[in-house]
Image (spheres, helix red, strand yellow):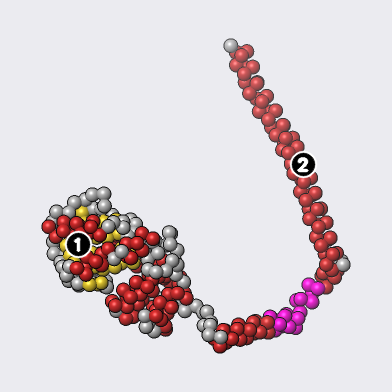
């Protein structure tokens, strides 16, 4: 037993000794190829550099002379002046081109509205959170039929036919609305209703017992179909006890330029009131994309001041 213990101990010590001797050798063997490759790479890069210099400057001495010249203050001033002259010529060329376009009846294109501000407007996120928090509406179009007196509501998510909304109006009036495949039913407090309707533009019948809130994306094809059919407007036009408000909820992930059109609608309402809001909205629903030019065209067509409209896009 003693002999075995001694043997075992010796074996362990011998392994440790061998590891201590072998490790530096292995490390050296592994490092040698790496060092060789590094030297070869350096020589190759240096060779390429020299070839490039010789091709362009004949020799490295000429390259150094050129570098020295470029550091002279007078040389740098001459280069700066030439750049400034070229920029000035380019500006004159653009101005001349714009003048020629105007003389030919073509308006010169220039940025009027800040489309970045439109895309980043916090109102879209607020409307989206509101629709989801209160009514579990996650897409567009999303509509909510609300009894402003009792707080009862029925949400309808999607472009359903007019008959579905007529049934919802009747159920909310009677207090019998229920949650189904179309959407959630529930009750709001008067404080919540006041918050939902704060600062909105009423299409018609402000103060009506039943109010339909529509969350929509102007470039959403289902929203366009819903709007073109006048699904909600027909009900409101025929019944003075039912009103409607429109809330912009552009989904930029699906329709990247929709926020620009939505901002145009909001600015129209801010500048010229409810009529301008819905007039701009009606025209906007005929577009498939929005940009600086076409939202400005819509604003001009409905009589908005160009400068006021542009200023609104900065807020």
Which residue lies under the disc numbered 2? Answer: 32
* Closer to us: 202 or 224: 224
Residue drawn at x 43%, y 78% as measured from the top left: 297
Residue drawn at x 12%, y 57% as measured from the top left: 174
**Left or right: where does residue 2 sit relative to residue 45?**
left
Q: Position of residue 38 (x, y in %)?
A: 76, 48
30 shown above or below 53: above
- Confirm or deny contact between disc 1 and disc 2 (CB under 8 A): no
Disc marking residue 22: none
Residue drawn at x 23%, y 49% as measured from the top left: 180
Q: Position of residue 12 (x, y in %)?
A: 63, 23
* Closer to us: 158 or 64: 158
Magenta segment: 66-84
Magenta stretch holds residue 140:
no
Crowdedness near tag 1: few (<14), some (14–19) or many (≥20) residues, C-alpha within 10 Å: many
Q: Position of residue 182 (x, y in %)?
A: 26, 52
Query: Does residue 1 show up?
Result: yes
Give the distance between the C-alpha atoms of the residues marked 1 and 2, in whole angstroms: 81 Å
Q: Quadrant of the N terminus?
A: top right
* Closer to us: 63 or 109: 109
Which residue lies under the disc numbered 1? Answer: 146
Quadrant assignment, res 141: bottom left
**Left or right: where does residue 10 sit relative to residue 202?**
right
Q: Position of residue 146 (x, y in %)?
A: 19, 62
Q: Of the two numbered discs 1 and 2 on the same chain, state the one appearing first in sequence.
A: 2
């Amino acid at each position: 037993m003693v002999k075995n213990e001694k043997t075992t101990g010796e074996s362990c010590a011998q392994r440790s000794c061998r590891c201590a001797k072998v490790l530096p050798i292995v490390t050296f063997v592994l490092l040698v190829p790496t060092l060789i490759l590094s030297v070869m790479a350096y020589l190759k890069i240096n060779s390429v550099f020299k070839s490039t210099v010789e091709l362009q400057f004949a020799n490295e001495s000429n390259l150094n002379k050129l570098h020295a010249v470029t550091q002279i203050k007078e040389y740098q001033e001459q280069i700066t002046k030439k750049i400034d002259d070229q920029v000035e010529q380019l500006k004159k060329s653009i101005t001349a081109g714009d003048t020629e376009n105007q003389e030919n009846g073509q308006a010169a294109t220039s940025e009027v509205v800040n489309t970045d501000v439109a895309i980043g407007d916090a109102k879209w996120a607020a409307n989206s959170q509101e629709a989801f928090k209160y009514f579990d509406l996650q897409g567009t179009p999303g509509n909510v039929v609300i009894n402003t007196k009792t707080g009862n509501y029925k949400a309808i998510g999607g472009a359903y036919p007019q008959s579905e909304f007529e049934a919802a109006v009747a159920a909310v009036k009677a207090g019998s609305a229920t949650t189904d495949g179309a959407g959630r039913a529930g009750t709001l407090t008067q404080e919540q209703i006041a918050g939902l309707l704060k600062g909105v533009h009423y299409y018609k019948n402000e103060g009506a017992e039943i109010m339909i809130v529509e969350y929509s994306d102007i470039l959403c094809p289902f929203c366009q179909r819903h709007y073109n059919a006048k699904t909600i407007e027909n009900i409101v036009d025929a019944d003075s006890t039912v009103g409607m408000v429109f809330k912009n909820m552009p989904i930029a992930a699906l329709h990247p330029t929709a926020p620009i059109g939505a901002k145009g609608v909001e600015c129209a309402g801010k500048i010229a009131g409810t009529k301008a809001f819905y007039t701009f909205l009606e025209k906007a629903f005929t577009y498939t994309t929005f940009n600086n030019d076409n939202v400005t065209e819509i604003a001009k067509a409905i009589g908005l001041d160009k400068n006021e409209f542009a200023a609104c896009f900065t807020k």
